[in-house]
């Protein structure tokens, strides 16, 4: 059996374009000319205009500037959290799946326990132990977020452990580390990459949900989940305060999810977690 190669060069444009687009959004957010945190009480709930395309909020802050600035946390923080979860979960899953035995049983037990506990519980515990903020938010997401990658990587490694190319590598003197770092990743790159795109939406919604409960970024820092909390109090007076961050969250998550499904179909891979 011949080991599949990494995704071909012609197969990367969608992934590269998506990552570049998200990073550009974060960069543009950092260049917002209007201060998104300075209140202007004389212009509270101002309607849309050339100066304020989306109007202002309850404190007179430019809503469009806050949406763009919020991308630095909502998108940038999601990318960081997702990357850390993917690296941690994939490394643990591939190693346990290939080695088997006690490490595999231990990993499965830990994953089963963590999966049974909602992420919100970890967020509440960490917020009580430390204080609400980004460190507690990231830790809560990492504790629970690595498990889906671990379970998928474990199953992929188990499937590949008895493949012909692994036997050939062993016959040629390749060690466990060499196989885990070179051969197994080549077989699992496609489904894991597609799975990462599909997990983006879940990670962003988890971060937004924890921020919605006050466990994430604290005022006046703009963040889409926290902005949604503020906007819900003015649904009848100024519904755009809630609709704008909600639209931003839905748009980004839907686009990245479509990318993940597209990669699944194009690469003919199965990212279903067993």
Image: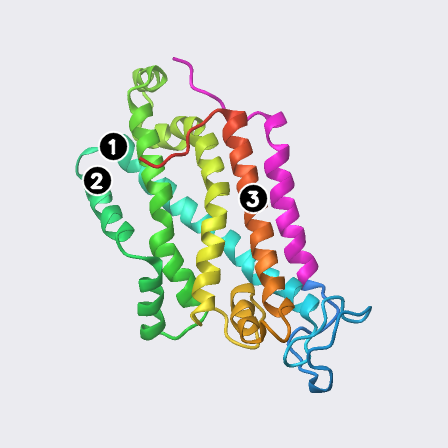
Q: Is residue 208 magenta?
A: no
Residue lying at the far bottom of the rendered structure: 42
Q: Position of residue 42 (x, y in %)?
A: 73, 86
Which residue does the image show at 61% across and 57% down from the upper left? 248
Q: Are marks 1 and 2 in contact (CB under 8 Å)?
A: yes
Q: Position of residue 114 (x, y in %)?
A: 27, 52
Q: Which mark is residue 256?
A: 3
In the picture, measured across the screen, residue 253 lies left or right of residue 173, that is: right
Secondary structure of the residue carrying tag 1 is: helix
Dividing the image into 4 quarters, which one contains the N terminus? top left
In the picture, measured across the screen, residue 20 lies left or right of residue 156, that is: right
**Separation of disc 1 and disc 2 at Cα?**
7 Å
Q: Which mark is residue 150?
A: none
Task: Magenta stretch: give its range.
Answer: 1-29
Q: Nearer the viewer, mark 3 or mark 2?
A: 3
Residue identifier under label 2: 103
Residue identifier under label 1: 99
> Can residue 81 be seen at all in this image of the molecule?
no
Indicate whether 92 appears above or below 164: below
**In the image shown, does 134 or 268 lie closer to the viewer?**
268
Q: Residues within 10 Å of mark 3 (few under 14, many from 20)?
A: many
Q: Residues within 10 Å of mark 2 (few under 14, many from 20)?
A: some
Secondary structure of the residue carrying tag 2 is: helix
**Mark sitting earlier along the chain (3/1):** 1
The part of the image, by quadrant, that contains residue 31 is: bottom right
Q: Nearer the viewer, mark 3 or mark 1?
A: 3
**Separation of disc 3 and disc 2 at Cα?**
34 Å
Q: Position of residue 142 (x, y in %)?
A: 38, 55
């Amino acid at each position: 059996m011949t080991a599949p190669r990494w995704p071909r060069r012609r197969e990367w444009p969608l992934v590269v374009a998506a990552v570049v687009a998200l990073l550009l959004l974060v960069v543009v957010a950092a260049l917002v000319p209007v201060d998104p945190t300075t209140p202007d009480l004389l212009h509270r709930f101002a309607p849309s205009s050339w100066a304020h395309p989306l109007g202002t909020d309850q404190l007179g802050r430019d809503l469009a500037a806050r949406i763009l600035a919020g991308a630095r946390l909502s998108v940038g923080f999601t990318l960081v959290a997702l990357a850390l979860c993917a690296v941690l979960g994939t490394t643990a899953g591939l190693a346990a799946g290939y080695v088997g035995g006690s490490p595999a049983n231990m990993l499965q037990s830990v994953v089963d326990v963590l999966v049974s506990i909602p992420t919100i519980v970890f967020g509440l515990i960490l917020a009580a132990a430390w204080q609400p903020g980004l460190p507690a938010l990231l830790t809560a997401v990492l504790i629970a977020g690595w498990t889906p990658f671990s379970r998928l990587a474990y199953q992929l490694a188990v499937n590949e452990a008895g493949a012909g190319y692994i036997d050939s590598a062993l016959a040629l003197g390749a060690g466990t580390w060499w196989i885990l770092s070179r051969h197994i990743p080549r077989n699992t790159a496609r489904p894991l990459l597609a799975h990462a795109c599909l997990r983006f939406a879940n990670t962003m919604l988890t971060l937004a949900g924890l921020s919605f409960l006050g466990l994430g970024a604290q005022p006046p820092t703009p963040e889409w989940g926290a902005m949604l909390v503020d906007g819900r109090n003015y649904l009848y007076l100024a519904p755009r305060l809630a609709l704008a961050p909600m639209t931003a969250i839905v748009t980004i998550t839907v686009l990245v999810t479509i990318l993940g499904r597209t990669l699944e179909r194009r690469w003919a891979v199965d990212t279903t977690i067993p």
